[in-house]
Structures are given as structure tokens and as C-alpha cells.
Image: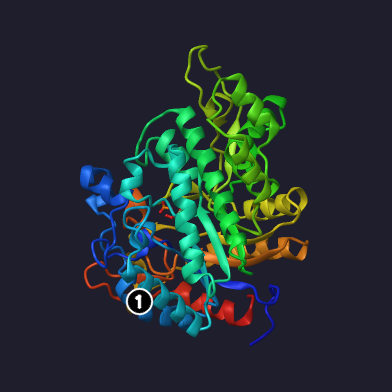
Amino acid sequence: MSTPEHLFPENFWWGSATSATQCEGASREGGRGPNVWDFWHEKEPGKFHNQVGSCEASTFYKNYKNDIALMKELGHNSFRTSISWSRLIPAGTGEVNPEAVAFYNNMIDELIKQGIEPVINLFHFDLPVPLVEKGGWESRETVEAFAEYAEKCFELFGHKVNYWFTQNEPIVPVEAGYLNVYHWPCVVDFKRAAQVAYHSILANACAIERYRKAGLDGKIGIILNLSPTYARSDSPEDQKAAHMADLFCTRAFLDPVTKGAYPRELVELLKEHDQLPAYDKADLEIIAANTIDVLGFNYYQPRRVKSRDVAPAADAPFVPENFYDFYEMPGRKMNEHRGWEIYEKGIYDTLLDLRDNYDNIEVYISENGMGVEGEKRFEVDGQIQDDYRIDFISDHLKWIHKASEEGSRVRGYHLWTFIDCWSWLNAYKNRYGFVSLDLETQERTIKKSGLWFRDVAQQNGF
Ligand code: BGP
């Protein structure tokens, strides 16, 4: 093999990511309690693509051994999944389910046995129903419940897991649930959204505090979906719009977890508009004292904005989009299946932002990927020829490599996802995996991109 043109730092993580609800299945087995997705699917199946819920997902709960062997075959040295809160503690608080303890122990042991670093996340949009019924993340009680759940996970698995993440994309339950009406509870209410956002950030800090108290010597962080914000033009109005979008969508999450405090400007703005969430001084101290060791950075698309053409009416409800409008750049490259722009350089711009403005925090790409509908049409001799995915990944890796050469402490790349998995409202519409899944038979078949990635991992570059 020739030396790769893009050689990555030693011990770079090559792998993929998924989450419990999206891959495990067996949602009514092994003593698992229902989570918000089970509850919502039962109520309104029509909201989900082809009415398919996560009940069976991609059967990782039963097939984890074979799936981990497959990961090994594809050169993975690391893999991220989450623990299902409602599997481990079905009522959200209190009693621990022994079958879940056995499953997660076996799964983690199997990864270690195969030489794959287990990267474990604690919360990926999947609140247990008893907590949903008590107000979900709007309630301070959920923060406490989460801290207890996290502590239990550290106690059970902390001696063998070196990398922990508290949450995946905390902005999603906030935006999708309380502003944009596409996750439960589907309301538009900024003040409630702000409460949920604040409680998620506080819960992250409380879990970190418990981790450090446990005296474990691994690393702990959070996973954020950071979309770099680009203004339509250099005009002061467009620049201001970009600044505001960045403040609400990025800095409102990134600053408290890395610097221990919210941007002053955001606090003042919410105060002025009477939108501050309820908070407690002692809790702010917990946030200040418990910042992350490592950041997971999910990257799919940039955020492009412009100034609003029309100012919001004086009595319009307070929402972030009162301060900016989204902008579709002419000629942009799109993944039409998902409706997301593809802009590879965005990953580099964010890595440099982290290098320059966030103390060059250790970071890894915890998700990046391309969902495609109807991949079957690309099948030749039983294998999906997903050259578009190979191009997508290598185009992003080039920018990651450049950022690394320029001093970013980027330490890994995980594709979303390993085996095609269930995706929230889109269920199985778009396929993201290195490995395709036959929904009838559950048969797994490696795609062309999986084999290509194995070579990249083996050469530590391409
Ligand atoms: C991220 C989530 C994942 C995954 C991915 C793809 O935001 O962390 O859970 O689903 O996006 O998005 P989607 O499934 O909506 O196509």
C-alpha cells in the first residue's frame, strides 16, 4: 500500500455512531420501559414515515455480537452508541433493570474484546415516559433524575468505558419540541424552550460533577451539532443576523459547556424580553465548575442567514427568527433526500473556531453522513455502490485533515451510521449506513463505502 496523501494523527478514531432508540429494537423486551418515541408513535403513528416506529429498529439488542464483528471487519477502532435510559431505569428514577445491566455489560465487553473503543452517550432524545408525564426537560426534577441515572451508569460501567458523553445535540429537543413543531410536545413557546435548553445544560454539568466525584480517570463531554453560520453578505444587517443566529443556536450551548457561563449578550437580551428561564444561583455555580474535557461535534450542514426583509410585528411572539431569516444560497450543493446543504468546508471553519475561540478543546467528529432514499437502485451484484457516500466522506475528511495540520485537536471521525437505522420521523426513509439493512430479513450487507472506509482506517488516511 502506498503512503496516504492525507495521513491522520496517531490513534485517530475511525468508526461510526448510532443511538439506542435508533438501533436496538426490542423496545418491549428485556424489561425496557417506554420512552417518548414509543408514547408518541402510539398516539400519532401518522407522523412517522410509513407509520414505522422504533419498536424493532435494526435489532442491535439481539445481534450486537455479529454487528460488532462486522465493525471489526470494517476497521473500526471506536464506536459510539447510547445507553437507553428507559431500558436501564424503566421508571426514569429508582429501580435498575438487571437485564439492561447485563446487555450493556456484554455489549461493552464485546467491543473491548474486538479492540473497539466504546464511546458511550447517556441521552439521545429518548426520555422515559414517566418523566415526560412530569413535564420532561421543563421540570427541574428531570435534571436530578438525569444526574442519578448518569451516576448509576458511571458506577456500573465507568471502570471500563473511557469516553463518556452526557447528551447528543441538546438543541434538538429544544428547537424541534418547542419551536419548530416536529418532535413531541410540538408546541411553539420560547420561554418553555429556554427552560428546556437551560435544564439540559445544567443536567450536563450535574452529570460531569458526579463523574468527577466518582474519581474515574476517563474523559467526559457533550455532543453538539455545530453548524457554522454564514451571512448572505458583508452588509452590517446581514452580519448582525448571522451574529444573532450564532448566539441562539451555537453559543447558547457551546459557551456554557466549555466556558462555564452563558454569553452575557444572550442573558441581557432574554432579560429585556422577559424570556429568561427560571434558574437558581447555586445551579449556575455547578455549570461554572463543571465544563467538559472533550467535545463531540456533529456536522451535517451550514446555517446561512440574512437580515429579515420585514421586521416582526410589535406583538409577535418572541422567537429567535425575529432576529434573522434563513437564506438559500444560489447554486448551493444539496442532499435533496434530506433537504440539507452539503458544504464540506463548514467542518474546517468550525474546527478552527474551536481552536481559536474555545481554547483548542479536544474534539472529535461524532457524526457526519449522508442519508439517501432508495439506495437499492444502486445495487450491483448484491452490493450497493454508494460512490456518492465515499465522495461525501472523503471531501469532509480532506477539510478535517487540513484543520488538523493547522493545529486543531481533532481526534476522530465517526460516520452516521454503521447499519442503516431508524431515524425519528423519517423512520427508514433515508439510509445512512456503511452496511445496508433488509427490513424484511434483517440481513446486513456491506456497501462499497464500508469497504473503502476499512482501507482508510487501516492506512490511517487516504
Ligand atoms: C442527528 C441525530 C441522529 C440522526 C442524524 C440524521 O441530528 O443525532 O440521531 O438521526 O441526525 O438525521 P435524520 O435521522 O433526521 O435524517
In x, y percent, where is residue 127? 38, 50
Q: Please rate how many residues cluster around mark 1, counting C-alpha atoms within 10 Å: few if below 14, some from 14 to 19, many from 20.
A: some
Q: Pointer 1: what residue?
A: 445
Residue found 54% across the figure and 54% down from its top = 207
Residue found 42% across the figure and 75% down from its top = 105
In x, y percent, where is residue 264? 70, 32
In x, y percent, where is residue 144? 47, 47
Q: In this orientation, which residue lies closer to the viewer: 412 or 164? A: 164
Location of residue 282 by image quarter: top right
Q: In this orientation, which residue lies closer to the viewer: 11 or 150? A: 150
Q: In which quadrant is the N terminus drawn?
A: bottom right
Q: Is residue 414 left or right of residue 257?
A: left
Q: In this orientation, which residue lies closer to the viewer: 164 or 173? A: 164
Residue found 68% across the figure and 25% down from its top = 237
Q: Amino acid at mark 1?
A: Thr
SS class of the residue under badge 1? strand
Q: Is residue 225 visible?
A: no
Above or below for 151 versus 437: above
Q: Is residue 438 left or right of residue 122?
A: left
Q: In which quadrant is the C terminus drawn?
A: bottom right
